[in-house]
Image (tube, rainbow, N blue to C red):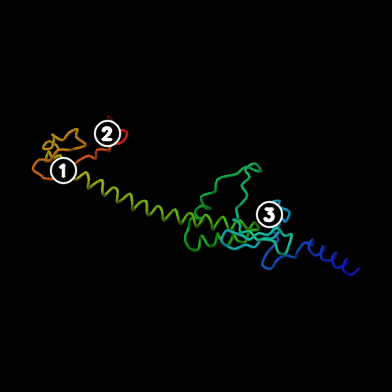
C-alpha cells in the first residue's frame, strides 16, 4: 500500500508544473520564443532570463531539469496588424548619437514593457558603430586607390611625352614574346602547355 502511494506521489511530482527558476521571469507573451517541450513539440517559452546583450535564456517551464536555450530577442514585425511609418529623424539622431543622448534613449527603452525594445536599440548601436568603422576603412582604401591612380597617370604622361611606345612599336601585337629582346641576354618565353592570351585580357577581342 505504501509503495503504491509513494509511486502516485512521484508521478504527481514529476508531472507538476515546476516553480519559476531563480533569476527567471514569466514570459507573459511578449517574447515570441519557441522551445522544445518534453513531448518534442515547439511551444512558447514560459520562463525567460534577460542577459542584457540582446539575448535571453528561455525554458519551456514543464520540468525542473529541462534544457535551457539561448535565443536572440527581436521586436515583432507583423506589418499586417497596423500601418507603419518610417522612423522620425529625431529618433534616428538619438540612435546614432554619442554619449548622453544615446544612453538616455537606451535607458528609456530598457524601461519599456517589451524586453526586446532595449535589445533592438543595443543591436542597432552595435551595427551602426561597425558600419562607421567600415566606412573609415573604405575611405582609407579609396584614398589609397586614388593615390595609385594619380601615380599611374603621372607615369603614363611621362611615357607619352617621351614617346616610349613609339620606340617600342615593334612589340605591338606581341603578348607572348619568344625571341631575345634587343641588346639583352634575357628571354621572355611562353610555356608550351599554356594557352595564348587574348589581347585586352580575358574576354577581350581575339
Is disc 1 in contact with disc 2, using a CB cutoff of under 8 Å?
A: no
Place residue 111 in its image quadrant: bottom right
Q: Which residue is mark 2?
A: 198
Of the numbered discs 1 and 3, the one sitting upstream in the chain is 3
- Residue 46 screen position, x and y as percent: 71, 58
Q: Which residue is mark 3?
A: 36
- Residue 121 screen position, x and y as percent: 55, 56
Q: Is residue 127 left or right of residue 138?
A: right
Disc 3 crowd rating (10 Å Cα; few below 14, some 14-19, many 20+) is some
Q: Is residue 137 left or right of residue 167?
A: right
Between the C-alphas of marks 1 and 3, the distance is: 71 Å
Q: Considering the numbered disc 1 on the image, is that residue within a helix, a strand or a loop? A: loop
Place residue 187 in its image quadrant: top left
The correct choice, above or below, for 173 with respect to 149 in the image is above
Q: Considering the numbered disc 3 on the image, is that residue within a helix, a strand or a loop? A: strand
Between the C-alphas of marks 1 and 2, the distance is: 21 Å
Front position among marks 2 and 3: 2
Residue furthest to the left in view is 183
- Residue 183 screen position, x and y as percent: 8, 43
Name the foreground residue: 182 vs 199.
Answer: 182
Front position among marks 1 and 2: 1
Disc 1 crowd rating (10 Å Cα; few below 14, some 14-19, many 20+) is few
The correct choice, above or below, for 108 with respect to 163 in the image is below
Q: Considering the numbered disc 2 on the image, is that residue within a helix, a strand or a loop? A: loop
Of the numbered discs 2 and 3, the one sitting upstream in the chain is 3
**For the C terminus, which image quadrant?**
top left
Residue drawn 75% across the image and 65% down it: 19
Name the foreground residue: 95 vs 185.
Answer: 185
Find residue 187 and name its label. Answer: 1
Place residue 45 in its image quadrant: bottom right
Amino acid at each position: 500500500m505504501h509503495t503504491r502511494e509513494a509511486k502516485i506521489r512521484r508521478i504527481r511530482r514529476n508531472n507538476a508544473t515546476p516553480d519559476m527558476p531563480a533569476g527567471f521571469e514569466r514570459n507573459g507573451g511578449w517574447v515570441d520564443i519557441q522551445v522544445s517541450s518534453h513531448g518534442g513539440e515547439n511551444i512558447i517559452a514560459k520562463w525567460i532570463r534577460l542577459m542584457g546583450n540582446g539575448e535571453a535564456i528561455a525554458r519551456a517551464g514543464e520540468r525542473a531539469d529541462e534544457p535551457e536555450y539561448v535565443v536572440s530577442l527581436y521586436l515583432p514585425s507583423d506589418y499586417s496588424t497596423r500601418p507603419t511609418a518610417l522612423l522620425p529623424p529625431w529618433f534616428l539622431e538619438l540612435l546614432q548619437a554619442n554619449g548622453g543622448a544615446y544612453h538616455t534613449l537606451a535607458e528609456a527603452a530598457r524601461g519599456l514593457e517589451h524586453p526586446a525594445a532595449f535589445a533592438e536599440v543595443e543591436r542597432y548601436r552595435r551595427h551602426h558603430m561597425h558600419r562607421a568603422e567600415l566606412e573609415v576603412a573604405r575611405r582609407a582604401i579609396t584614398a589609397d586607390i586614388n593615390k595609385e591612380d594619380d601615380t599611374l597617370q603621372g607615369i603614363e604622361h611621362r611615357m607619352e611625352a617621351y614617346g616610349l611606345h613609339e620606340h617600342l612599336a615593334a612589340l605591338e601585337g606581341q603578348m607572348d614574346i619568344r625571341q631575345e629582346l634587343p641588346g639583352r641576354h634575357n628571354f621572355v618565353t611562353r610555356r608550351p602547355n599554356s594557352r595564348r592570351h587574348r589581347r585586352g585580357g580575358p574576354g577581350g577581342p581575339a
